[in-house]
Image (cartoon, rainbow, N blue to C red):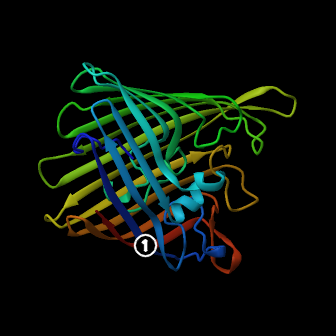
Amino acid sequence: MTDQYDSIALGKVTIEGFIDTYFLYDFSKPPNQERPYAVSSNRDHEFNINLAYVDVKFRSERIRARLVPGFGNYINSNYATETGTLKNLVEANAGVLLFPKKNIWLDAGVLGSPFTNESAISKDHLMYTRALAPEYVPYFITGAKITYPISDRWTLYGYLINGWQNIQDQNRSLAIAAQLEFRPNKHWLINLNLYGGDENQANRPRFRNRWFGDLYAVWKSDGPWSATACAYFGIQNMTTSNQLQKSFGWGQINGVLQYAINKQSAIAVRAEYFHDPHNIQISSVNPVLVGFSTGGAGFCFNHRLSKQAMFRAEYRNFTASNQHFFGRDSGYSNNNHLLITNLTVWF
């Protein structure tokens, strides 16, 4: 999610809402009706809620605050390590304007993540489903953020946070991140993001420092075309059995192109590739395989029912050189096909 305070009248509280419903059919019929490799819209062969939230925002001349409690499959999957009521915080943060003349803000709490070209909020994107890319970076971060507008086109953000994606700190070691945002004109948004932190945890005792960077762009023409693309690469330091440290990498690339048929309807296509040869982020559902790599493609039809409602229907396919996907008769397959429909309403 992104900061959206500009339209709020000073000294006022605004309340908004969002409901993302879907029906998924995965042709492989995964066990327990749980689609692997996804935290968003991952329940098979049933109607369900991916994400529903209420967004409460306040803004004064020097203070701003935001509280976004959320519910749904996305929350269940992505906040599994959190405890108690923390499981239901999509965002919860407060900010103070440090230097009014330069518009420098300091915000702290549970914050929206700057990483990749897609977030948990489906209505903001060219296709309904998310690529594998955002599913394996933080959707949210917890800590402090400073916003420094360099110019009308450039903005720099600095973060001191609890870790890769968690509200409660897992190892008593803080991480750092930086975001450089460039808006050369009304058509383009370009972001460079960097992360560094110790990822040692009780469930990952071999993990040490992680270094990560991603670059993405969003483009909207004056005509019917829109597009976005993202590439990222990460390096994870790990201790070996003889207590030496080695570095292992993973990365991905994806792109989406959309064409607006008219003011209500649009079609979009996606291509992506994810490569994780050492299972840093993804472990195959096939227990005999080491490493994970797959290519993916998708086609989505988008139709706006009104200014505050959207229907989508999407086909998605993954193809891998190894059998990383569930197959028929309790086996495994190189391919995965799914269909998904969605109705989203916001107010």
Q: Residue furthest right?
A: 242
x and y, in percent, of residue 167 in the image: 59, 43
* Residue appearing at x 66%, y 38% in the figure: 169
Q: Does 39 sit left or right of 17 as displayed?
A: right
- Quarter containing the C terminus: bottom left
The answer to which quarter of the image holds residue 151 is top left
Rendered position, 246 above or below 169: above
Residue shown at 19% from the left, 40% from the top: 187
Q: Which residue is mark 1?
A: 22
Image quadrant assignment for residue 259: bottom left
- Residue 247 rendering spot, x and y as whole percentages: 68, 30
- Which quadrant of the structure image shows residue 265? bottom left
Secondary structure state at the residue bearing disc 1: strand
Q: Decide: is 6 above or below 85.
A: above
Looking at the image, can residue 91 be seen?
yes
Farthest residue to the front: give it: 11
Q: Is residue 214 left or right of residue 323?
A: left
Query: Horizontal placement of 314 versus 90: left or right?
Result: left
Residue drawn at x 59%, y 38% as measured from the top left? 164
x then y, percent, for residue 308: 24, 65
User: Is residue 198 placed above or below 299 in the rendered structure?
Assistant: above
Residue at 38% from the left image edge and 66% from the top image edge: 19
47, 59: nearer the viewer: 59
Q: Amino acid at mark 1?
A: Tyr
Specify few, some or many for label 1: CA neighbours under 10 Å numbering under 14, 14-19, or 20 or more: many
